[in-house]
Amino acid sequence: MLIIVHIAFLSLGSNLGDKLLNLEQALECLDACPEIKIIKKSSWLANPAIEEAGPNEFLNGVVKLETSLEPLELLKAVQTVELKIDKERASRGRKYARMIDIDILIYDNLEVNTEDLCIPHPRMLTRDFVIGPLNEIEPSWSEKYSYA
């Protein structure tokens, strides 16, 4: 059986609890998934919270991974990790402070626009805490991914 491997980039952020531990646990959970292999990780950067997510500052970073999961399957895997680390996330709401937040930024050159998932991430180009770490691990990303 032929397994197709896709390249994806995820952003991770945390601004509640032990932020570094939350991020490292998220990476361990993602890497434990047999269909996901993390191949690069940026530095973790401290950033002010945006919108309603404050007042605690965030620790953010980006990972590059290989996956055999399709985009919606990857989203489901990411959401499972978020709920495993932050069982109260849903009760606080999406835009508020969180122990872990994981977004799919890029998935191959694929464009997805559904109610549940938008790829490329619609706000990634306006967020320094995404672009900086993305440039760190994949300096030529904007040349490789046609929608960037």
Image: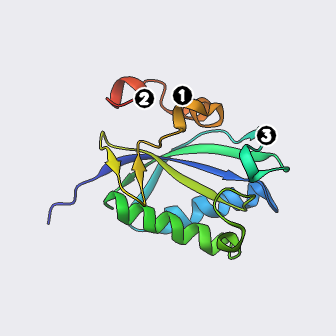
First in residue order: circle 2 vs circle 3:
3
Amino acid under label 2? Answer: Trp
> 15 left or right of 67?
right
Q: Quadrant of the C terminus?
A: top left
Q: Do the CB atoms of the residues marked 3 and 1 lie less than 8 Å apart?
A: no
| Rendered image: mark on residue 141 | 2
Q: Do the CB atoms of the residues marked 2 and 3 lie less than 8 Å apart?
A: no
Q: Is residue 56 above or below residue 79?
A: above
Q: Is residue 127 above or below residue 30?
A: above
Q: Secondary structure at mark 2?
A: helix
Task: Sort mark 2 into few (<14), some (14-19) or many (20+) by Cα contacts within 10 Å.
Answer: some
Task: Sort mark 1 into few (<14), some (14-19) or many (20+) by Cα contacts within 10 Å.
Answer: some
- Residue at 57% of width from left, 43% of height from top? 62
First in residue order: circle 3 vs circle 1:
3
Amino acid under label 1? Answer: Asn
Amino acid under label 3? Answer: Pro
- Percent x, y for residue 25? 65, 64
Q: CA distance from mark 2 to mark 1?
A: 7 Å
Residue at image mark 1: 135
Foreground: disc 3 or disc 1: 3
First in residue order: circle 2 vs circle 1:
1
- Residue at 34% of width from left, 28% of height from top? 144
Residue at image mark 3: 48
Which image quadrant is residue 41 in? top right
Foreground: disc 2 or disc 3: 3
- Percent x, y for residue 24? 67, 58
Which image quadrant is residue 34 in? bottom left
- Percent x, y for residue 143? 36, 23
- Residue at 56% of width from left, 68% of height from top? 81
